Amino acid sequence: MSTVNSGLVHDLLVELDRTGPLPLHRQIESALREGIRAGRLPFGSSIPPSRRLAAELGISRGVVVEAYDQLVAEGYLVSTPGSYTRVAAAPEQIVTEPAAPPSPGPRIDFGYGRTDAASFPRAVWLRSLKRVLTTAPHDRLNYLDGYGVPELRKSLADYLTRVRGVSATPSQVLITSGFGQAGALVLQVLADRGGKRIAVEDPSADDDIRPLAVRHGFEVVPLPVTADGVSVEALERSDADLVMLTPSHQWPLGGVLPAEARAAVVRWARTTGALVLEDDYDAEYRYDRAPVGAVQGLAPDVVIYAGSLSKTLAPGLRLGWLVLPPHLTSAVAEAKLLADRGSPAIEQLAFADFLVRGEFDRQLRRMRPVYRRRRDALLAALAEHLPDLEPTGIAAGLHAVAWLPDDLDEHAVVTAAADHGVQVAGIAPYRLTKPGRPGLIIGYSSLNEAQITEGIRLLAEAITTMLPATSATRAEGTPAGAGRRAR
Amino acid sequence: MSTVNSGLVHDLLVELDRTGPLPLHRQIESALREGIRAGRLPFGSSIPPSRRLAAELGISRGVVVEAYDQLVAEGYLVSTPGSYTRVAAAPEQIVTEPAAPPSPGPRIDFGYGRTDAASFPRAVWLRSLKRVLTTAPHDRLNYLDGYGVPELRKSLADYLTRVRGVSATPSQVLITSGFGQAGALVLQVLADRGGKRIAVEDPSADDDIRPLAVRHGFEVVPLPVTADGVSVEALERSDADLVMLTPSHQWPLGGVLPAEARAAVVRWARTTGALVLEDDYDAEYRYDRAPVGAVQGLAPDVVIYAGSLSKTLAPGLRLGWLVLPPHLTSAVAEAKLLADRGSPAIEQLAFADFLVRGEFDRQLRRMRPVYRRRRDALLAALAEHLPDLEPTGIAAGLHAVAWLPDDLDEHAVVTAAADHGVQVAGIAPYRLTKPGRPGLIIGYSSLNEAQITEGIRLLAEAITTMLPATSATRAEGTPAGAGRRAR
């Protein structure tokens, strides 16, 4: 490395490495920035004219001018016509946060609601992004409306009609940043229209609709769920303005709402003037049975259909959609516009390209056997290590529920599992009416078969160390329930 | 094109083109899909076993199996083990919307608040996307928190400290989908904490804070704006819980809040316990004067800083940020999580890469002279064609205000301009307290110099045809105010 130092240059601590990869002007910028930050070049002090510094460094003046221009642009220097360039007013010292110590984390995480992030088709998605950035009209980069880009509304209407039996024209499709926002928009419009009561499945997810409903002042009515899905009798008694359903794979119990119940839900909505919000959250993954179409296809006038990429491509994309009855479309679009002025255009266009080229179908086709094998590994491991646990909701989706024997306390099992390095959720936290049958929600989509088998083995170990009592606390020193597995 | 037809195949209307670019299995898929859609293959009817169709078509069985698998995946066919594959339940006919007839649109659009979409650095942005998709850890594609990806929070804290004099650690930075959402989150948290009154500049933008404030039930207090920015005296009398300011370039009038007024705003906030929301919406474009740092740098304890890419890269990216006083960070992150579960990860990471590599600085440096030339063209055209109009707010930003002589009615000028093919906004729609001095808001950022000159020439023509009266309606048939330009 050959460096140059001289009087003035030495003051500025400019050291040029003429053989390194960094252009000379970047080296000057960096030296001056450092000098200003460190206080060697005090605020308001003048820096040498570009001609003089260039001469001292033995480089062309243009290089120095480029560096000064950049620092002026960045606010480090101030250039006043007819005067010296000076160091600008104080930028605060950059304070970097101390990094949090990495938490150990569970050895096996049966967290639900994940895709296998490692299977995200990065190269294919990049190709779609590239096509979009190469071909999209400039206007698509400008402000958006609250509906979404027309390319995606069209290709989604096409896809959902074809694959999910949804009845949709592009004008009914509205792009959201996922189910959470979709629910927020629908509830806001419903609140504006005087809605009072929301019926939800019990148990159901507690992170979207339920907190939003509370925030909007809705009364939340729980509807019991059986192996087949929600109780329609309870719905008919609910006096709700909207019911939130997961008919193709009830979350978390996994039931599929039978045809008669679907017809009854539609009848209820039409008779009472209520709406149905259908969360088609993992309909794309079905393993052992024929596909079940969306309820929306039966009654597009009263059913709001919601879907997203969170369970099929990646939650980090934040891309979802609503198919709305025509009379709701403009109100929801207005709410979306006020909430965030539309979802990012480039990713919408990329997904439209991905859909139209058949890449989405291809990705689902690729992942279905992968997830199926993982589910099969889970069922095999449960049968081997925990035969007393009864799996349910396994025909589709990315998780299974395993019912616990009644004498095992759910919370205690979850805690014991965590102690054995296994993260698994109970059902109780998702119930609105307690207590209920104890069970575990076991997500298998982001673990490979070996991890799944190991996780269930560890879970069995954890359960073996537990008392067969129903107490929520572990009684240390008491003989462990080793007979558990033998029963 | 060589095609094959035979008995069964003929029924299915499968025509194979063995010389074309489409793979055989795609051709089969497409033919069957068409047959199902058109009703030639009725729902529930069985389709031939793959072996038989393959034999009839003289192709390998694997090709047919691949086609059937795809159609099963798409829901067109249902495959039952040990039985024939059948046509599935009815997907609705796809109905495509008739395209709306293209509206003629203005010849010259002086709309404000735009970037030059044609200058978006598509290739460089794509390189950042590519690096992200090649290198980002899988976890970044999973569910996010309400704060934003750490890479971007760090690089933004760095950038804003360096360039805008903001005082920020990464922990105070929160990623939003632009200023609209940033405002929505802040107002929601303020409402939750019992805020009652929001002070805004008069005139000010009417599309974000003001409608949101009304939605949350806040009282909106207008503060008069002079050439220097907001009236601090009015602020001190406002009894507001939060004031929304554009101190570096008041929107729309373009004033820069002087140092004493900034200090007074901070004093007011600290004395009353109120907050300041600083919208630094186009601080990056300054042409004739030294950069003015953000007010937040003076008082990070009471000022919430908001910025976005909408005026620097592209509104369609939907990427913005807040720098929050530490006591507000977690509440705003919670609101963000409930609103949309975080902004899309890939674009956040791409912008972090873009920032760290100096591409953002480079893009701003590239655009500054472009916009400056456009502004100069606007000023020259105004001086030549409309010398009676007084430009203001021209030292920075992407638009100018031109005051109209008092005897010209603003609305009438806007209407006459539209009749002459020129889209331009008046100030009146943005005022809370009417009336005020008449003027035009002239955005120049997305027009080239020739278009700007032509637009001002047309505007002058429009004004020439007007009466010099102050009536808001045009009196047809009265001699036109041809003397206007001569005065």
Image (spheres, coloured by chain):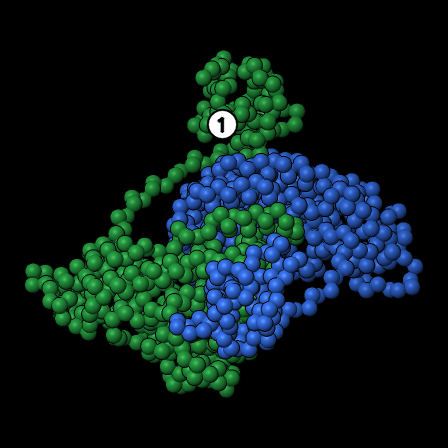
Chain colours: A green, B blue
Q: Residues within 10 Å of mark 1 (few under 14, many from 20)?
A: some
Asked whether B399 or B95 is in front, the reply is B95
Instruction: Give the camera-side residue of B83 and A276.
Output: B83
Q: Position of residue A400 (x, y in %)?
A: 32, 66
The chain holding disc 1 is A
Task: Give how far across and how far down residue A424 sits, in percent.
Answer: 27, 61
Identify the residue at image location x=50%, y=13%.
A7
- The percent coordinates of residue B373 (x first, y second) are 71, 38
Residue bearing the label numbered 1: A30
Residue at 36 percent of width and 78 percent of height: A228
Residue A177 percent coordinates (x, y): 50, 60
Q: Is residue B295 left or right of residue A460?
A: right
Q: Is residue B82 above or below residue A177?
A: below
Q: Is residue A271 above or below residue B485?
A: below
Q: Which residue is painted at 45% across and 36% down in the image?
A: A92
Looking at the rendering, in which quadrant would you find the N terminus of chain B? bottom right
Number of marks drawn: 1
Query: What residue is shown at x 43% (from left), y 84% (from top)?
Result: A260
Extreme residue toward the top, this view: A6
Instruction: Identify residue type, mark 1.
Output: Ser
